[in-house]
Image: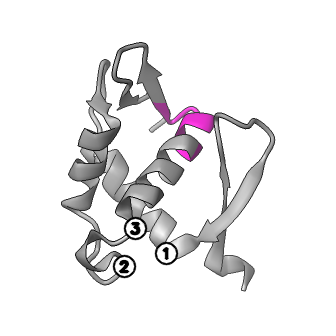
Amino acid sequence: MAEDKVVVENINTPGRTSRVDRTKYEDMRRAYLDGLTDTAPGLTAAEAKEAAKRTLSPDVFPGGATAGWWAKTVQLDLEAKGIVARSNTKPLRFYKTDKA
């Protein structure tokens, strides 16, 4: 059972973790990172979500269902781990770091 879940962090609440479905997390993580740029300023949250939706597995996310929630979960986790960074822009923009 434990292997069906993955622990995620949240940059906004350091030290707090949650456990989420591994299959959905890993598919969104792959798609999210594939869609992001390697340099600042990067993509807005909406642009990153749309880029990720184009390569999500239709078996895992039929019709893109719940993709928005999963994109935000992955974004916050990857930020907490230093894999994704945000540009100080309005609206916020996100890009991959050299840890990606």
Inspect the magenta stretch and tell me whether residue 35 lies in it.
no
Disc 3 target residue = 66
Q: Residues within 10 Å of mark 1 (few under 14, many from 20)?
A: some
Residue ID at (31%, 84%): 59
* Relative horizontal placement of residue 31, taking residue 24 as reference (left or right): left
Give the extent of the magenta segment: 77-84
Image position, residue 64 (x, y; %): 28, 69
Question: Which residue type does callout 3 highlight?
Answer: Thr
- Among the two numbered marks 2 and 3 on one chain, the one whose residue lies closer to the N terminus: 2
User: Which quadrant holds the C terminus?
Assistant: top left
Query: Disc 3 versus disc 1: distance between alpha carbons?
Result: 13 Å
Front residue of 64/74: it is 64
- Among the two numbered marks 3 and 1 on one chain, the one whose residue lies closer to the N terminus: 1
Asked whether disc 3 touches disc 1, contact meaning CB atoms under 8 Å apart, the reply is: no
Residue sitting farthest toward the right? 15
Image position, residue 96 (x, y; %): 39, 32
Residue 46 position (above or below residue 54): above
Residue ID at (25%, 60%): 53
Question: Which residue type does callout 1 highlight?
Answer: Thr
* Relative horizontal placement of residue 59, taking residue 26 as reference (left or right): left
Asked whether disc 2 touches disc 1, contact meaning CB atoms under 8 Å apart, the reply is: yes
Front residue of 91/49: it is 91
Residue 23 position (above or below residue 8): below
Check disc 3 and report its element: helix, strand or loop.
loop
Image position, residue 87 (x, y; %): 40, 18
Residue ID at (30%, 49%): 49
Residue ID at (64%, 35%): 11
| Nearer the camera: disc 2 or disc 3 | 3
Query: Disc 2 versus disc 3: distance between alpha carbons?
Result: 10 Å
Disc 1 target residue = 23
Residue 60 circle label = 2
